[in-house]
Amino acid sequence: MLKGHSSSVSSVVFSPGSTLVASGSYDQTVRLWRADTGQPVQMLKGYNHPVTSIVFSPDSTLIASGSGDQTVRLWRADMGQPVQILKGHSNSVTSVVFSPDSTLIASGSRDRTVRLWRADTGQPVQTLKGHSSSVSSVVFSPDSMLIASGSRDQTVRLWRADTGQPVQTLKGHSDWVTSVVFSPDSTLVASGSYDRTVRLWRADMGQPVQMLEGHDRSVTSVVFSPDSTLVASASGDRTVRLWRADTGQLIQTFSARTSQLSFDHDNSRLRTDIGLLKDLID
């Protein structure tokens, strides 16, 4: 257990090499910890509003954090030093993500937009407009061709990453979309929602593929396994469910109070924001 924040933790993420853990909090700080021992490494200060979202760059050199102060901040992951402050949103930043090549940053906000920024200079690149309510989740496709954004307007929108042009609007959820993710092979999009379902969509056509039902409360996080064959979903019902991506069949249900999920690179373990959930290969 990692102790140190003085208020609720809003976001937890492992570094790509799983050597560090970063946590963002309503205490207005980001903290870095050693993943193997839980020892604190750095405390990143500078906010006067809660930290809402954090992410490591794929090359592990930078950390991006979003906040209620309407900014995205970039930090050096090794030293914890501030690098850039990205300003442009007119409401709280809710989600931050790097492109797979670490050159771009996308941020979603309660101002209903997704903004793209250059990671090296912090310069704005595009503003993606179309949602009619807060953007809750944003993600790049693994091939860097598309961006997906989920919103309280109950839709998922797909955009071209190079031009910011809209591609598809995915409709089907009956409540706020909380989490969006591409499969590692870039063929599918999964979305979780307050309507208690996970929906799978074809990334190229935007067509619905599966609706995964079983959770008793809102779905808070959705993630694909590295080989794109499994989908894991976390929920406010304090369970994590594991599904087959091709058929939508439920494989296992675990008891876990968590809001964030990730797989190890070899598919062998499923992790939560509080640690290892399950060895999938015994």
Image (cartoon, helix red, strand yellow):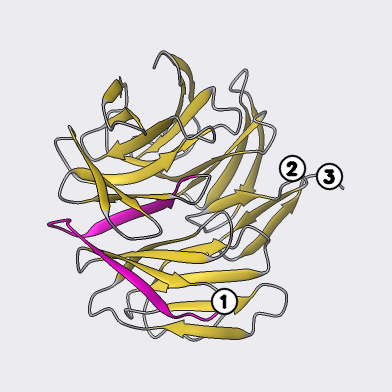
* Residue linked to disc 2: 267
Q: Nearer the viewer, residue 163 or 263?
A: 163
Q: Measured from the top left, where is residue 10 in percent x and y?
A: 39, 66
Residue 6 visible here: yes
Q: Where 5 falls versus 149 (above or below)?
A: below
* Residue linked to disc 1: 78
Q: Where 111 falls versus 191 (above or below)?
A: below
Residue type at mark 3 is Ile
Image point 54% across, 36% down: which residue? 142
* Residue linked to disc 3: 281
Q: Which sits earlier in the primary sequence, circle 2 or circle 3? A: 2
Pointer 2 and pointer 3: residues touching (CB < 8 Å)?
yes
Image point 57% across, 79% down: which residue? 2
Mark pair 2, 1: CA separation: 28 Å
Q: Nearer the viewer, residue 45 or 189?
A: 45
Q: Measured from the top left, where is residue 21 in percent x and y?
A: 58, 70
Q: Is residue 200 left or right of residue 111?
A: right
**Residue 251 falls within the magenta-colored stretch:** no
Q: Which is more foreground, mark 2 or mark 1?
A: 1
**Residue 84 falls within the magenta-colored stretch:** yes
